[in-house]
Image: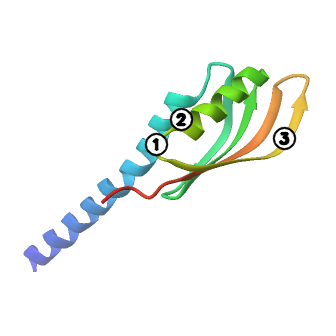
Amino acid sequence: SDIRHLQEHLIKIKSISTNQNVPLEHLTLLQAVIPYDVNLINLETNREKIVADVSASSTDGLNQLLNDLQSAPSVARVYIGDMKRSAVSGIEFHLSVYLKPPKS
């Protein structure tokens, strides 16, 4: 009974530690590609994609973000949607980044 309980506990720990690496990898990717004048307004992530509402102060920042995302080895596709200009925050848009499956 104690051994079974310990095994179940170890399985839960392994599951948590395995699943926690994915968001950390996503955050590391974003940290590497987001220019100084680009801000994430909100962020959602899962194994397959990163979705965010983003604000870019300049078209240069937007272009740099897109180029860096598209050249990242873990990124499969990048989509931009709902783009609008704002006098206060610059260019606001919805970003979807689809990721390649992790190599086993």
Q: What residue appears at the point 62 percent right and 44 percent down from the top-left corner?
A: 43
Q: Which image quadrant for residue 15?
A: bottom left
SS state under label 1: loop
Q: Which of disc 1 and disc 3 is earlier in sequence? A: 1
Q: Find residue 83 and name its label.
A: 3
Check disc 2 and report the residue beneath it.
Answer: 30
Q: Residue furthest bottom?
A: 1
SS state under label 3: strand
Q: Position of residue 76 (x, y in %)?
A: 55, 51
Q: Which of disc 2 and disc 1 is earlier in sequence? A: 2
Q: Which image quadrant for residue 41?
A: top right
Per the model, the C-alpha gap separating discs 1 and 2 is 13 Å
Using residue 59 as the reference point, say whether residue 23 is left or right of it: left
The amino acid sitting under disc 1 is Pro
Q: Which image quarter is the N terminus in? A: bottom left
Q: Which image quarter is the C terminus in? A: bottom left
The amino acid sitting under disc 2 is Leu
Check disc 1 and report the residue beneath it.
Answer: 73
